[in-house]
Image (cartoon, grey):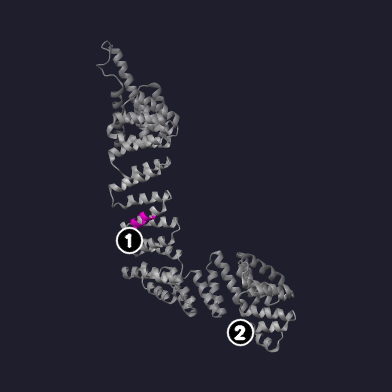
Amino acid sequence: MIEKITNIVLIVASIFMLQSCGSTKTATQASKKSTSTAGKSNGSSKKAEYNAFFKAETERIKGNKKQARTLYREFVKRFKSNGAAYYNLSKLEFRSFNFKDAEEYAARSVELSPKNKYYLEHFADVLSLNKKPKKAVGIYEQLTGLYKENADTYRYKMYKIYSDLDEYDKAYKTLDLLEQNWGVSPEITMQKVDLLLKQKKDNLAIETVKKLVETEPRNAEYKENLASLYDKLGRKEEAKKMYEALIDDAPNDTRLLMRSSSYYLRNKDTVGFQNVLKKIVANPKIDESIRMSMLLPLIEINNDTSYIKSDILPLVKSMKAEGGGDGKSAKMYADVLYSARQYAPAAAAYREYLKIDQSKFAVWFNMMLCHSNLNQLDSVIAIADESFDYFPNNAFTHYFKGTAEYQKKEYAASIKSLQSAIDLEPERDLKAQIFSMMGDAYHSLEDYKKSDEKFEAAIKIKEDASTLNNYAYYLSIRNERLEDALKMSEKSLKLMPDTKTFLDTYGWILFKQGDYKKAKIYIEKAIEGDGDADVLEHLGDIYYKLNDESKAKEYWQRAKKVGGGGSKMLDKKIEEGKYYE
């Protein structure tokens, strides 16, 4: 604490002594006729001034702005010739957003010390902020003459003011002066270009950037400035030529390559955009993480299986070889195989990656998806069980396992897995899906009470179109709550209009209600283009009820030919030419 106070004393004393030297007369300049009494009085006054200054400055240095402002205000009322006090008070007012007072005190400090660099700089800054730019320019011009070593700093501030005032010629001339001292630079060049564009001097702007390029013909950054300017001015062909040259000149400069890709993207040149991204991905000198990040946009732009196989996979395979078994490239290789719908090799690649790292759930999930797409349901279940060692509390894995078991018609096992998922409190959308599937499973087990309970639970969370449709259809099969079923079916069609499965459900409920003509309209819509066995059989049933037995038999036979569905009574209907429930 003693050391800190000593430092403050030294700082304050230094400030005060400097101020005293600059603003008071020396003893030799004083009148020789001064009496000894006057000398004592003057000394006493100086001491009081010093003590008051010391007190105010100590509070400022300690960070007590409010107290310092109060003390300095009292000080300048008593001692009106201390420039340092006015300067410090102005800064305090400035930091307290009292800009008017800040200007007044800054002006007074300059009056007392007209050539003080710091007072002048601060005064100019305050004037500029107080929207008195022309006065500020006058101060900066004064500073430029007084302190030539800092002249460029003041000129740059003058350029900013001229630019804000839309005095473009003065701003441009100021930049010219800076350029004479600094030489041609990208910063000044592009500021000049901005001024020229504001004055619609497009050709001169282009020539200005060309001048920059000439200073370093191999500088890709300068060429990119020119290419960007061409693009901004709508000179597309010239811009394209520059960007193509830029890509060749700077094959390893990721930042410039990315800017080039943005040019192609802005101009909807998909082929050009793809080519730049491919150059990035194929270049082993570019950081691997950047190359990998470019793969997703490449795939998204042309999400075509054949393109991914022919163009993307070889690049990723090469990256994988470069990585020498590195996990990132191995996973990316598996992901791209999956995107190319190469499910078997993708599953194998994910399995290989798991030898390196088992901590990423996405890998397990994608591997299950691969086997699911290959209809290898036993593998899906086995992978889910294996993943529980690493992710025992992941509801989605239990759901996925339950889905595979449902597809295998192992309904009891499916319900058990799905209940395990529910017990883990999944997020609401997933929870609704799980309840919906449990409803399907219980229906298949003919436990209709529990089936209805699960569907009701699912709908309470979210009125999903598929859930509404399935629940409605199951009720219609059972000839129960047909009005409720019809309402749910209508909702499903509002959510997903023209969905053929939903149209069939709606038509079938109408059939169950005896409205055969209207039912025929919806079932026929469901068959447009093609139709599965269930829908074709339904239309046959409707024709039978409309007393068109030949048409009924025709559609029953079509249902039999299509296969993969139909009721247990389909063969009997065909054989006897009669409708059976």
User: Which residue corresponds to mark 2?
Assistant: 561
Q: Position of residue 144 (x, y in %)?
A: 31, 31
Range shown magenta: 240-247
The question of residue 243 being in magenta is answered with yes
**Image point 59% across, 76% down: which residue?**
441
Indicate which disc residue 414 carries: none
The residue at the point 24 percent across, 16 percent down is 28
- Foreground residue among 309 and 436: 309
Q: How many marks?
A: 2
> What secondary structure is marked by label 1?
loop
Establish if 545 lies above or below 71. Answer: below
Q: Residue furthest left?
A: 28
Q: Residue at x 68, y 89 (%)?
A: 575
Q: Is residue 551 above or below residue 46?
A: below
Q: Give the image quarter of residue 549.
A: bottom right
- In what quadrant of the picture does the C terminus appear? bottom right
Tell me the quadrant of the picture where the N terminus can be found.
Answer: top left
Residue type at tag 1: Ile
The numbered mark, 2 or 1, whose residue comes first in the sequence reads 1
Tell me which corner region of the image, top left, top right, bottom left or bottom right, holds residue 574. Answer: bottom right
User: Tag 2: residue type?
Assistant: Lys
Dot 2 crowding, Cα within 10 Å, few <14, some 14–19, many 20+: few
Instruction: Give yes or no for residue 74 being in the magenta stretch.
Output: no
Q: Which mark is residue 286?
A: 1
Q: Position of residue 55 (x, y in %)?
A: 36, 29
Camera-near label (2 vs 1) is 2
Give the Cα distance between marks 2 and 1: 58 Å
Tell me if I can see residue 580 in this picture: no
Quadrant of residue 153 within the rendered picture: top left
Image coordinates of residue 315 in percent, x first then y, are 36, 68
